[in-house]
Image (cartoon, grey):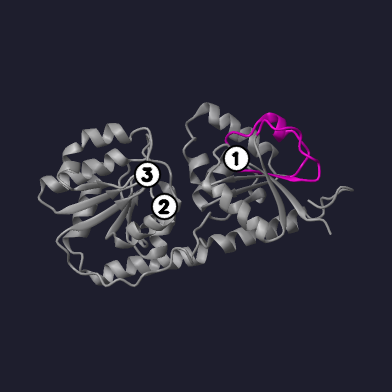
């Protein structure tokens, strides 16, 4: 029997793609990765697009089954971008299936033209084995540890976070902010807040391995995501999985993920004063074990139920088999 054939297109060569390809290969899909400019695709292969906002017309026009995946970033961040919206509309017209991560993004896709019957809500997820829940006894510490690993790019809110930390320090609240990752705004921001670095308040770890990232998450008293548009992020899911409380910008995908505050704390997007206030309140009584433990347990449960990466990829594989199994020709199976 022929293996099911899948061609994956992605413009970012991201870790997300590598993980999906790896899981599909484990369950007997024959997978290949291609760039958009590589030659024609055989008619018996399913086309899987890692970003639906940049699919070229020549691939949208082929008769192969076409699947697009869009976590919150692709659709949510391009609502007001005319060029990107035109790409999305073209994609929605030709895709056979759109995979999104939450109800809110599914709603946007429906409003701008995607057939509701062709939308599958399936979060990216995390490995529950890699990010196991840690039962940590919380206790009052002199220094309150905050962690963020968001990209150092415009729109990811690192300036909002650093400004909130500056205010905490000005009000003599003892914190340590651990930052990792890299990007185009890093040098400028670290120079702007150099005093925080020199005083030991901000500790920059650079690019970190997954193992180091888990360690930083587990040791943190709270994880902060100040991104202005990237909701339902893997970093928040990882935090929820290990049991580190989350404070995140109140963009709609995060409101969905954190159940309007049940699984974490929300602050007003782009507002460092709001983030400062939420951090101050949380730090003020870190021994409020009932509230902290409620966040931790509820967040872990959310990930276990909805965001188990391996089971979600398996569910996607089964759906593709069911949906496209009848689409076969003399060359083999889709």
**Residue 176 makes an appearance in the image:** yes
User: Looking at the figure, which quarter contains the N terminus?
Assistant: bottom right
> In the orientation shown, which residue stands out farthest toward the right?
330
Q: Residues within 10 Å of mark 2 (few under 14, many from 20)?
A: few
Give the residue pinned by disc 3.
181
Give residue 10's mark.
1
Of the residues under marks 2 and 1, which one precedes in the sequence?
A: 1
Residue located at (34% from left, 33% from top): 185
46 over 244 or under it: above or below: above
Q: Residues within 10 Å of mark 1 (few under 14, many from 20)?
A: some
**Over which residues does the magenta segment extend?**
36-65
Give the residue pinned by disc 2.
209
Rendered image quadrant of residue 51: top right
Q: Distance from label 2 to label 1 (Cα)? A: 23 Å
Residue located at (27% from left, 40% from top): 160
* Callout 2: SS: loop
Residue located at (45% from left, 64% from top): 302
Residue 14 % position (x, y) = 53, 44
Residues 25 and 157: in front is 25
């Amino acid at each position: 029997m022929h293996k099911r054939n899948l061609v994956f297109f992605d413009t970012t060569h991201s870790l997300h793609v590598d993980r999906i390809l790896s899981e599909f290969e484990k369950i007997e899909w024959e997978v290949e990765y291609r760039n958009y400019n590589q030659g024609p695709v055989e008619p018996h292969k399913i086309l899987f697009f890692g970003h639906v906002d940049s699919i070229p017309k020549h691939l949208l026009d082929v008769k192969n089954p076409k699947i697009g995946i869009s976590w919150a970033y692709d659709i949510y961040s391009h609502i007001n971008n005319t060029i990107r919206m035109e790409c999305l509309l073209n994609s929605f017209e030709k895709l056979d299936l759109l995979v999104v991560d939450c109800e809110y993004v599914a709603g946007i896709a429906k409003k701008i033209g995607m057939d509701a019957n062709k939308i599958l809500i399936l979060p990216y997820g995390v490995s529950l084995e890699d990010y196991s829940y840690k039962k940590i006894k919380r206790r009052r510490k002199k220094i309150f540890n905050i962690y963020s690993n968001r990209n150092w790019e415009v729109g990811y809110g690192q300036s909002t976070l650093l400004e909130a930390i500056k205010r905490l320090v000005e009000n003599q609240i003892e914190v340590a902010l651990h930052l990792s990752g890299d990007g185009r705004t890093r040098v400028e921001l670290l120079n702007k807040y150099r005093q925080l670095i020199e005083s030991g308040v901000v500790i920059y770890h650079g690019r970190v391995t997954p193992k180091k990232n888990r360690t930083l998450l587990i040791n943190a008293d709270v994880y902060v995501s100040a991104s202005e548009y990237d909701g339902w992020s893997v970093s928040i899911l990882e935090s929820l999985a290990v049991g580190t409380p989350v404070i995140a910008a109140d963009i709609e995908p995060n409101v969905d993920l954190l159940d309007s505050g049940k699984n974490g704390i929300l602050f007003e997007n782009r507002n460092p004063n709001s983030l400062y206030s939420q951090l101050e309140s949380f730090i003020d009584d870190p021994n409020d074990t009932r509230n902290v433990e409620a966040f931790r347990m509820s967040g872990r449960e959310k990930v276990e139920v909805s965001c188990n990466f391996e089971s979600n990829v398996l569910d996607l594989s089964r759906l593709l088999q069911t949906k496209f199994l009848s689409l076969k020709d003399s060359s083999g199976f889709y």
